[in-house]
Image (tube, rainbow, N blue to C red):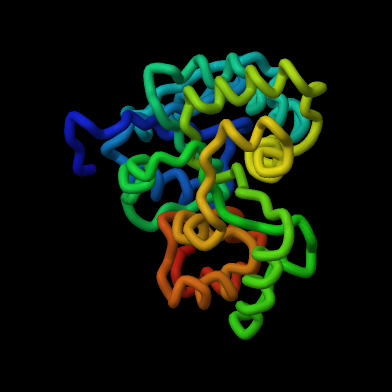
């Protein structure tokens, strides 16, 4: 990590909700702790879950225990990540990188992306199954869809500016009913649709965001980035795993 006095502060934040990790999750965590070893890493977990074995393996990580109710399912997790209190607990830092254990980071570009000054960055994707695993020959189809439809910047591997998220949620909570959907949609789709919310988060274009992370249709995305891998990827086992066999050492 190359830094200077003017660099923003950033923390890597990893949700873990079960004691036994899959082989892919172990690989994801090892890659994170290797490539991003120059940054503080905080693992947030249910209070009842013992992760001392992970702490022993990776002494540099900190464990943060939260109420078990936040880990009962996807809805509970979404509610946690749209709560002001969650972001306030990381206020010593300006940015957080949410790194779920179905992500894989290729190289340390974290400070590079922080310096760009965006409030939220994630892999651009469309919540429609026909765009989940397009082949490289359909890159133009994926590009046209992203250009013409409301896309989501996926939250599973995402960079968030903490003061901006707190401000955004304060304003949203004042004018709108409680958010019930996927948390990343509130910070991408809704942030570009709702007035005045579109004034309060600075987001990248989808063309720039795909250099931050791939998610759905990685083969088509790889064509659109001229065969340049992103900083990281998300859900590589779920969307076109065959594509990733050439880039992620699973054995």
- 98 vs 179, nearest the viewer: 179
Tell me the residue at 55%/48% (across/down): 122
Question: Which residue in the rendered view is the most extreme toward the bottom?
Answer: 137
- 105 vs 192, nearest the viewer: 192
- 135 vs 163, nearest the viewer: 163
Q: In which quarter of the image is residue 76?
A: top right
Left or right position of 142 against 33: right
Quarter the N terminus occupies: top left
Tell me the residue at 66%/64% (across/down): 146
Q: Number of labelled discs?
A: 0
Q: Is 129 located above or below residue 11 in the figure?
A: below
Q: Quadrant of residue 149?
A: bottom right
Q: Is 71 located above or below residue 218 in the figure?
A: above
Q: Can residue 184 be seen in this view?
A: yes
Q: Can residue 34 be seen in this view?
A: no
- 103 vs 136, nearest the viewer: 136
Tell me the residue at 32%/47% (across/down): 112
Tell me the residue at 33%/42% (across/down): 115
Please state the horizontal and vertical placement of residue 21, each as a whole percent of the image.
56, 42
Q: Is 201 located above or below residue 156 in the figure?
A: above
Please state the horizontal and vertical placement of residue 5, each as a whole percent of the image.
18, 29
């Amino acid at each position: 990590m190359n830094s200077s006095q003017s660099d923003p502060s950033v923390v890597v934040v990893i949700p873990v909700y079960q004691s036994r990790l899959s082989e892919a999750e172990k690989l994801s965590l090892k890659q994170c702790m290797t490539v991003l070893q120059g940054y503080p890493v905080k693992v947030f977990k249910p209070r009842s879950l013992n992760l001392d074995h992970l702490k022993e393996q990776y002494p540099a990580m900190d464990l943060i225990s939260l109420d078990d109710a936040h880990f009962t399912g996807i809805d509970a997790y979404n509610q946690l990540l749209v709560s002001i209190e969650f972001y306030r607990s990381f206020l010593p830092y300006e940015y957080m990188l949410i790194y779920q254990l179905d992500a894989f980071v290729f190289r340390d570009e974290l400070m590079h992306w922080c310096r760009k000054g965006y409030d939220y960055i994630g892999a651009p994707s469309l919540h429609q199954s026909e765009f989940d695993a397009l082949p490289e020959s359909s890159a133009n189809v994926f590009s046209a869809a992203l250009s013409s439809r409301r896309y989501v910047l996926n939250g599973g591997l995402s960079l968030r500016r903490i003061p901006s998220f707190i401000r955004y949620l304060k304003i949203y909570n004042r004018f709108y009913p409680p958010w019930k959907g996927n948390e990343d949609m509130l910070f991408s789709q809704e942030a570009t649709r709702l007035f005045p919310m579109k004034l309060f988060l600075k987001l990248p274009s989808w063309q720039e965001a795909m250099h931050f992370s791939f998610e759905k249709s990685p083969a088509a995305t790889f064509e659109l980035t001229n065969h340049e891998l992103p900083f990281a990827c998300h859900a590589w086992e779920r969307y076109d795993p065959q594509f990733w066999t050439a880039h992620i050492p699973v054995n």
